[in-house]
Amino acid sequence: MKNTIKITVILFFLSITSIHSQDANQFFTKANTFFNTYVANGKVDYKDIKASPALLNELVTEIASIQVTKSKSAEYQAFWINAYNISVIKNVVDNYPLKSPLDKAGFFDKIKHTVAGKNLTLNDMEHKMLRAVFPKEPRFHFVLVCAGLGCPPIINEAYMPNMLEDQLQIQAQIAINNPNFIMVNKNKVKLSQIFEWYKGDFTQDGKSLVDFINLYRKEKIDAKAKVSYYPYDWTLNKQ
């Protein structure tokens, strides 16, 4: 009798795990279709999404209940990156037309989204669910897209668990080699304010900002270069 109960409990938890896995897989596939459809050249077609919001609304409904575990780090990170970018788009679409995400009060720190059973702001997703859990991963800053043109560009595909390492690496390389994102003039370099706001994320283990940047640069920056920051462009990244 005890063995029967034990087997039943094990089967129950295995079935729950299988359902969660299927839900997550379906979400990644659907999210990929969404980004393929509405993102091009680093910009989002908010007007079309607002006119036909069915797929966005399906994704918002799905991320509300999907559960991912930190032990499966690639799935966890990919889920929260996609959930963040989808939630940003949802905020814009709900308030469209906007010239900037900052035109809507509380865009990042007040408006709540239900994700994985939790009521969270965009800042909560970024800082509590990703940066706090994986403090050694500065590349999040190149894939979390805030709807402003100053952000690294949003890509027209979902972040996938089995591709995540390559996707993080590629997006870091694209951003850091973009002359509009990092402006180099001889021994002077102007950086995005992302590097100012989150300097601690990029200067772990005794690295300087230039040390970190040179990990991804094709043309290395002089270690003695004078570093400054240019103003962030909050203009909406619309098509």
Image (cartoon, helix red, strand yellow):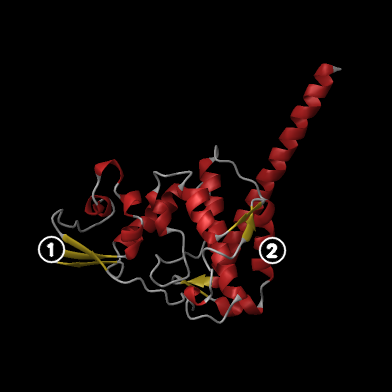
* Residue 31 screen position, x and y as percent: 60, 60
Is there any visible trace of residue 206 in the rendered image? yes
Left or right of 6 in this view: 110? left
Label 1 SS: loop
* Residue 208 screen position, x and y as percent: 23, 50
* Residue 181 screen position, x and y as percent: 31, 67
Left or right of 95 in this view: 143? left
Q: Name the residue under label 1.
A: 187
Identity, as a three-letter code, of the amino acid under mark 1: Asn
Give the foreground label among 1 and 2: 1
Is there any visible trace of residue 158 in the rendered image? no
Whichever of labels 1 and 2 marks the residue nearer the N terminus, that label is 2
Vertical relation: 209 (above or below) 229: above
Q: Mark 2 points at which residue?
A: 58
Cα distance between the residues tagged 1 and 2: 50 Å
Vertical relation: 3 (above or below) 172: above
Identity, as a three-letter code, of the amino acid under mark 2: Glu
- Residue shown at the point (86%, 17%) measured from the top left: 1
Question: Which label number is shown at residue 239?
Answer: none
Label 2 SS: helix
- Residue shown at the point (40%, 57%) measured from the top left: 141
